[in-house]
Amino acid sequence: MQLDDLLQRYFATTDLSGVSPDTFAAGIEHCRVDLGLEEDRGKRFALWSFLHMFGSAPDLDLAFENEEDREAARNFMDLMAASEGDGVS
């Protein structure tokens, strides 16, 4: 799954600057539904990560049955948190 493809699928654009709040909310909800229906572990992780970047990911225990997947998600969250301090001022 490519980020641009996910943005296009859920928000009908790759440029979020012009997305209305209603369109954004609808896209997030659509993605959450797709996450709930997805059975492929890799795709589930990609959708969860995408939602996490927007502050809309479900809790790990709800999103992942497998402990390895939950641990990978924790590692992803740690990497994202660490990268937040690396931005250019």
Image (cartoon, rainbow, N blue to C red):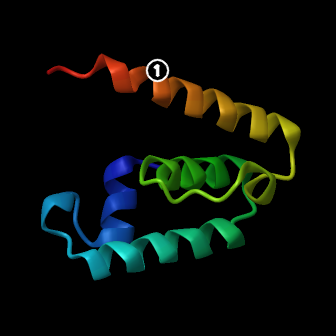
Instruction: Give residue 60's position: percent from left, percent from top.
Output: 73, 49
Instruction: Give residue 49's position: percent from left, percent from top.
Output: 54, 46
Q: Is residue 33 shown left or right of residue 12?
A: right
Mark 1 secondary-structure assignment: helix
Residue drawn at x 81%, y 52% as measured from the top left: 61
Residue drawn at x 48%, y 28% as measured from the top left: 81
* Badge 1 density bin: few <14, some 14–19, many ≥20, Cα 10 Å: few
Q: Please tell me whether residue 3 is drawn above or below residue 31 in the rendered image.
A: above
Front residue of 4 and 23: 23
Instruction: Give residue 62's position: percent from left, percent from top.
Output: 78, 59
Q: Please tell me whether residue 8 is drawn above or below residue 76 in the rendered image.
A: below
Front residue of 89 and 36: 89
In which image quadrant can residue 10 be found?
Answer: bottom left
Q: Please tell me whether residue 12 is drawn above or below residue 54 in the rendered image.
A: below
Instruction: Look at mark 1 in the image and give the residue it sits on.
Output: 82
Q: Quadrant of the C terminus?
A: top left
Residue drawn at x 21%, y 60% as measured from the top left: 16
In which image quadrant can residue 78 be found?
Answer: top right
Tally the numbered discs. 1
Q: Is residue 52 shown left or right of residue 11?
A: right
Front residue of 78 and 49: 78
In which image quadrant can residue 86 be found?
Answer: top left
Q: Amino acid at mark 1?
A: Ala
Q: Is residue 24 shown left or right of residue 79?
A: left
Residue drawn at x 70%, y 73% as measured from the top left: 37
